């Protein structure tokens, strides 16, 4: 939890309490339905929570912003972002139903009224979204084809609406395949821990 407060020192008491519950909640649910590796449960705040929150270093979601988390798995990046931005709305989808059960249980335990969890594929998500967030679900080109029609052309953030994808490693081939303008943010520019040295956010504006 200290690592979260190190980079996000202005959390409210409620946010600190919610983030503080994540370790126990994920340890409990992961023992029943495996959504993250056992090793990663021990490193939850660095490898999952702070990694998810890195998106907030690129854009601060505004009040009433509508965010789609594609392939959320156990709720990343959606759950940490929903805690961080309680005035924004988050729609978390995954094609594996048991993972969505974990997401729903954790959102309920944290009393996150701004989270909607749904068992469906990205193409089936209904809504008009400011941003699509995701973490290493698939290559950017197919993701773009699934979600481009769901992203609102009404831009109210400092950056154009689009995709914010947490990725790692060499992305040259993947971005060449996309054939669209994109920008890479290196997470080592925001965080000093070794885990983030190869981690990136790929931003693809749409609109």
Image (spheres, rainbow, N blue to C red):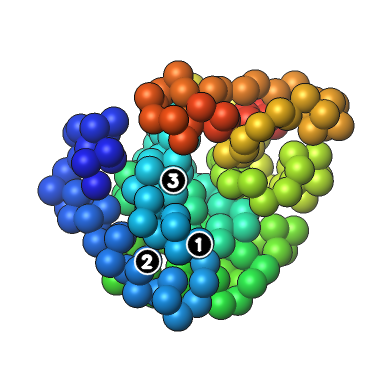
- Disc 1 secondary structure class: loop
- Disc 3 secondary structure class: helix
Q: Nearer the viewer, residue 81 or 61?
A: 81
Q: Position of residue 52 (x, y in %)?
A: 45, 44
Earlier sequence position, callout 2 versus callout 1: 2
**Lateral position of residue 97 relative to residue 5, left or right:** right
Q: Is there any visible trace of residue 90 in the rendered image?
A: no
Residue position for label 2: 26
Residue position for label 3: 47
- Between the residue at mark 3 and the residue at mark 2, the CA separation in whole angstroms equals 13 Å
**Lateral position of residue 78 relative to residue 135, left or right:** left
Residue position for label 1: 36
Crowding around mark 1 (Cα neighbors within 10 Å: few <14, some 14 to 19, many 20+) is some
Above/below status of 143 relative to 172 = below
Looking at the figure, which quarter contains the C terminus? Answer: top right
**Lateral position of residue 15 relative to residue 179, left or right:** left
């Amino acid at each position: 939890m200290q690592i979260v407060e190190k980079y996000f020192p202005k959390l409210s008491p409620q946010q600190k309490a919610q983030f503080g519950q994540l370790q126990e909640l994920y340890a409990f649910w992961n023992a029943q339905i495996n959504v993250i590796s056992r090793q990663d449960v021990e490193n939850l705040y660095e490898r999952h929570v702070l990694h998810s929150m890195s998106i907030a270093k690129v854009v601060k979601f505004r009040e009433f912003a509508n965010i789609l988390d594609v392939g959320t798995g156990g709720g990343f990046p959606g759950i940490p972002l929903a805690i961080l931005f309680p005035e924004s709305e988050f729609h978390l989808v995954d094609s594996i139903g048991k993972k969505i059960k974990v997401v729903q249980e954790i959102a309920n335990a944290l009393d996150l009224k701004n989270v909607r969890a749904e068992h469906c594929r990205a193409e089936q998500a209904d809504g008009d979204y400011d941003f699509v967030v995701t973490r290493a679900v698939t290559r950017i080109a197919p993701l773009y084809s699934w979600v481009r029609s769901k992203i609102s052309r009404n831009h109210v953030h400092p950056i154009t609406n689009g995709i914010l994808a947490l990725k790692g490693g060499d992305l040259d081939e993947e971005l060449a395949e996309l054939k669209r303008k994109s920008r890479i943010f290196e997470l080592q520019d925001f965080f000093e821990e070794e885990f983030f040295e190869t981690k990136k956010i790929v931003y693809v504006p749409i609109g």
